[in-house]
Image (cartoon, rainbow, N blue to C red):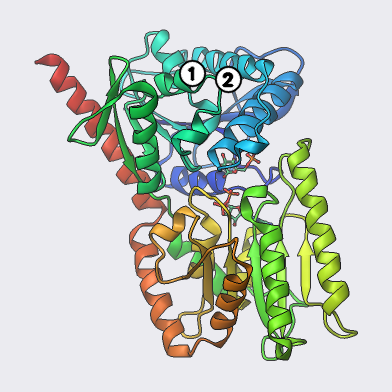
Amino acid sequence: MSRIIVVSNRLPSPRSSAGGLAVALTDCLSATGGVWIGTSEDIATEPGQRLRPLDETESLFVKMGFDLTRQEHENYYLGYSNSVLWPVFHGRADLMDYREEYDISYHALNARLAAMIAGLLRPGDLLWVQDYHFLPLAAELRRLGVSNAIGLFLHIPFPDTNDLQVIPDHVELLRALLDYDLIGLQTQRDVNAFLGSCRTCAGAELMIDGSVSAFGKRTAVASFPIGIDTEGFALEASRTLPPRHVEDPERQHLIIGVDRLDYSKGLPQRFLAYERLLETHPELAGRVSFLQIAPPTRSGLRAYSEIRAELERLAGCINGAHADIDWTPLRYIHRALPREQLGSLYRRARVGLVTPLADGMNLVAKEYVAAQDPENPGVLVLSRFAGAAEQMTEALLVNPHDRGAVAQAIHRALRMPLGERRARHASLMRKLLEEDITWWSTTYLKRLRDTVWHRKIVTAQ
Ligand code: ADP
Ligand code: G6P
């Protein structure tokens, strides 16, 4: 029987930091079963040559891990993946730190992983590769003679051509991408950016069926906006009791933000927009409270320690200027919370603030809406630069760089009449229920199967 084999850098684990990819795929593979390959959390002294089963027995799917050496962690993970691809793909080419040793390690790791996976594959298995850590994986597998269907889903935005060209080996990256049978992106904007780069940098031809042809290869490209387990999340949020010590909602309106502490999330801009709200609406003093949960991520990289220091400074300044003996306007928690607690906090919050400067999708936006009480829902204030904005048009869409506009949107959300809140929530929920995590994975996998089927017919003719 054909299996689904998912490959991602991060495997889900109670010890690992939060992140959209691991959360979404746990939901998906728990439903379909299959094999999930990713990095273990152990550091090896020598590059491992074999995948090993990870013994987490409660899992509904098989987990196979490979160890990174300390050098690979630094050069492949923190280096090429998170100091070259991540900043450039999020429109922060200024933060790119390109080094040859990063590039070499990234390609060597992909080649090593391809060899390990090739030994495990059976005919008919579908390989589904996740995210920017493995852009050249299909090319390495093809080099080894693997002819199975291989799809890629990119969870982060695809950059504009000018940004992409900042990466020294961008043409090689594009050439490698064309070895996938199907490239899935989050939004139509990303599809356009990808096709634009293929045309400009590789003289690619765009075919009428939406595929792209370059370097003598052809790949299908489409957007598949990732969803959440909407029903499950809503149910859990409605059942879980809120943690104690959350202020009485009758007295204070809660505004909530939940993000990894990443520079792409626009957190300093968000704090400043909240301060603007307090300045322009002094009547809100003592009546609102902003809770920002921002767990650490990718520690060891300067860009991340800098954003942390900046945020702590801003939180101190805002509280220093506005707090009172019995009121803390801004609470900032620098650690992850259990997911059940997140749901009930979202439900207690009158406003969900999701204002990234760039984001592939942003699952927090979807979780916040799913967690609301349909009878008395809160309002989502959403950056137009989050992939989620393409679907979630009934949120209050904002430019996160425009402090005044974000402050106004929060104010509007706080004052929004019940009827309008209900109507907006109902139509957001309709879409979230239709395009949930199961829809995402089944639509993607069906398209991957169709693409390969079509390729076989064309080759046979
Ligand atoms: P990203 O993938 O860039 O981290 P997303 O918003 O798409 O951003 O996904 C983040 C995921 O991680 C969400 O499912 C969210 O619930 C979870 N998460 C984020 N912060 C926390 C936290 N402090 N505690 C627990 N889970 C968190
Ligand atoms: C984003 C990326 C994922 C990544 C997650 C957490 O969602 O798209 O690939 O797993 O962030 O980042 P981390 O570096 O901790 O895996």
Which residue was labeled with disc 1?
Answer: 117
Of the residues shown, which amino acid type is indicated by label 1?
Ile
- Residue 445 rendering spot, x and y as whole percentages: 32, 38
Task: Report the side of 43 relative to 451 (left or right).
Answer: right
Give the mark count.
2
Q: Can see residue 305?
A: yes
Residue 123 drawn above or below residue 318: above
User: Residue visible at 45% across and 57% down?
Assistant: 388
Which residue is at the far left?
461
Which element type, helix, strand or loop, lies under badge 1? helix
Q: Quadrant of ligand 2?
A: top right
User: Residue visible at 66% across and 20% down?
Assistant: 102
Which residue was labeled with disc 2?
Answer: 51
* Distance between the alpha carbons at the discs numbered 1 and 2: 8 Å
Residue 134 drawn above or below residue 239: above
- Residue 39 rendering spot, x and y as whole percentages: 62, 29
- Residue 77 rendering spot, x and y as whole percentages: 66, 28
